[in-house]
Image: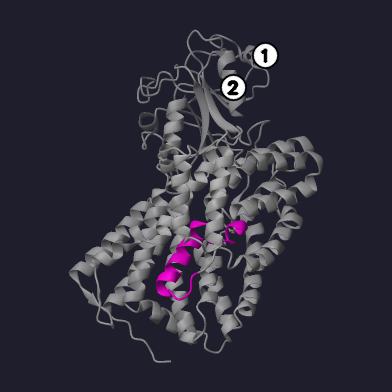
Amino acid sequence: MQPITPDAHGIAVLILTVIALFLFTRDQIPLESSSLAILIILMFGFTIFPYETAAGSRLGAVDFFAGFGSEALIAICALMMVGKALETTGALQPLANIVGRAWATWPVMALLVTLVAGAALSAFMNNTPIVVLLMPILVGASLRSKFPVTEVMLPMGLATIIGGMSTTIGTSTNLLVVGIAQDLNPAHRFSMFEWALPVVIIGGIAILFLWLVAPRLIPDRTPPMGDTSPRVFSAQLHVKEGGAADGMSLSEVLAKADGLRIDKIQRGESLFLAKLPSVKLLPGDRLFVKDSPENLKHYEQVLGATLFNATDLEHPIDEQTPLRAEGQQLAEVVVTRGSPLHLRSLAAARFSASYGLMPLALHRARAPNSQVTGDLNMIRLRAGDVLLVQGSRESINMLKDSGSMLVLDGTTDLPRTHHAKRALTIMGFVILTAALGILPISVAAVLGLGLMIATGSLSWSDASSALSIPVVMIIVAALALGKALVGTGMANYIAFNFVDAAAALPTPMILSAFLLLMTIMTNIVSNNAAAAIGTPIGVSIAAQLGVSPEPFILAVLFGANMSFATPFGYQTNLLILSAGGYKASDFLRVGIPLTIIMWLGFSLILPMMYQL
């Protein structure tokens, strides 16, 4: 093979790619900000220093805008919105009923039914609403049947990720890889179910592992849960002047609020009182407690206390946070990477003023049994933390519609409306026309979106809330980086060196090593970033070896989806971490052997499929 020498532009793009991968792992920087910065640097750099490719064409700033109009991005956005209709119309409720009945009769087989159902549904829609739907079912079933919920919650979440690999529309990562691959190799167009068979075979083995082995690998945990919610929150009851608890002794308070357990009593800034039965409570005293949201609100009412500090002048109860208004609701908000609350305090994020909601309590996913002390508004929040908030229905709906934070509705049934059948029919139309090759996926998805809105199955507010700015921006930035890597010849240079280093190995082992590299990368950076950067390199490796690019494209697709080993590799992993009371080590216990099974399986089946 002829050696490839990189030029200054190629080296600069490679350095920028490394910087991008570093930025995408930084929790302190929003994902969309990192993506925009990378895009600006690329455009500015190629404007100041123009570049001509070997073919004589010019690679300029305008070329990096192409990601905003790419077929892959259009399809991803349209499918996000079409999938939202299945959620809002309650079309998934029959699945919930089937799974619920199975758990009531035969828990062991019900776990298998849950894993298969979650994986199958994830092949056609985003797995986040599926996980949110199944979590309360699993919690309720485990309480009734005494089946440890920690043994089923994590396998269920990982099964949905496996199912998402099986079709073109299963995840945004799949669509992105297919879109880039078609740009680089227009001669081959992937069909919807082109790689479903290897995923069914290897994924089937993986699901058997999740059913029979994974529950035994997870240590006994005692997840915080109540009858309707899997979370126990740390909170502070503020004794109010004139309230029922004002002047009461501790023994009288405990008698009045049956079941209340008080961890600490604080008076003033630094004085903690001994929990003696005779201690008299005074206005301003804070009772540190832990319980479910329903019990916390019950104790608040019985004792005439408040879960917020009514005398806090920095966070007053006013027109923006009208807790005394009619129609008050509780909501649980998950702190995810890239959200406005991640690694910030509520005060720094101006949460109450921005959203009109009052924070009441906190569940720390990484340390569920720890007591939260100090001012709730000053605590630095971490990924996986769940915040209990109170406010009007309108304020909570606005928070959901903003798309900036993940609001859990797991304790209530999804709405069952007359639009559910229409939504399912339209989704079936999208899947069928794309699967039969009648319409391109992007066209079918946009047409489906139009039908959802025209039939009233989806409102524009719900459709817009389904869009994720971080996902859009990282796709555009990653596409721009991929274009720069290919245009400057750096993708070929990386591929040449990868092949040169593995020259002594047969092609199937080179493919296996590349699949492993993509798997490691996706657990460090985001799935879409790994996919967009890895796809052009995979195509170049295939060209260097003189073999079909399809198996290397699928190696990128499968590797970029295998976010099993860390709780922060995928958004649903964070939900599972919080709801199940897991530790990060539990994901390693299950995720590493699961990754090995999938990696070895695909390493064997891909060379057989493509006769390498």
Residue 51 vs residue 357, the one in the foreground: 51
**In this view, 39 is above or below 497:** above
Along the horizontal axis of the image, is 174 left or right of 98? left
- In this view, the residue farthest toward the left is 48
Q: Secondary structure at mark 2?
A: loop
What numbered label is drawn on residue 255? 1
Looking at this rendering, what residue extends furthest in the bottom direction? 1
Residue type, numbered disc 2: Ala
Residue 323 horizontal/vertical position (percent): 45, 20
Above or below for 209 versus 338: below
Q: Position of residue 128 (x, y in %)?
A: 55, 47
- Examine the rendered structure and indicate whether residue 482 appears above or below residue 98: below
Q: Quadrant of residue 288?
A: top right
Q: Mark 1 against mark 2, which lies toward the viewer?
A: 1
Residue 166, magenta (yes or no): yes
Which is more toward the observer, 369 or 225?
Answer: 225
Rate crowding at label 1 as few (under 14), some (14 to 19) or many (20 or more) other CA atoms within 10 Å: few
Quarter of the image containing the N terminus? bottom left
Magenta-drawn segment: 162-189
Residue type at mark 1 is Ala
Residue 274, x across and y down, in percent = 59, 22
The residue pinned by badge 2 equals 274
Q: Position of residue 217 (x, y in %)?
A: 72, 56
What is the residue that sits farthest to the right in this orientation? 106
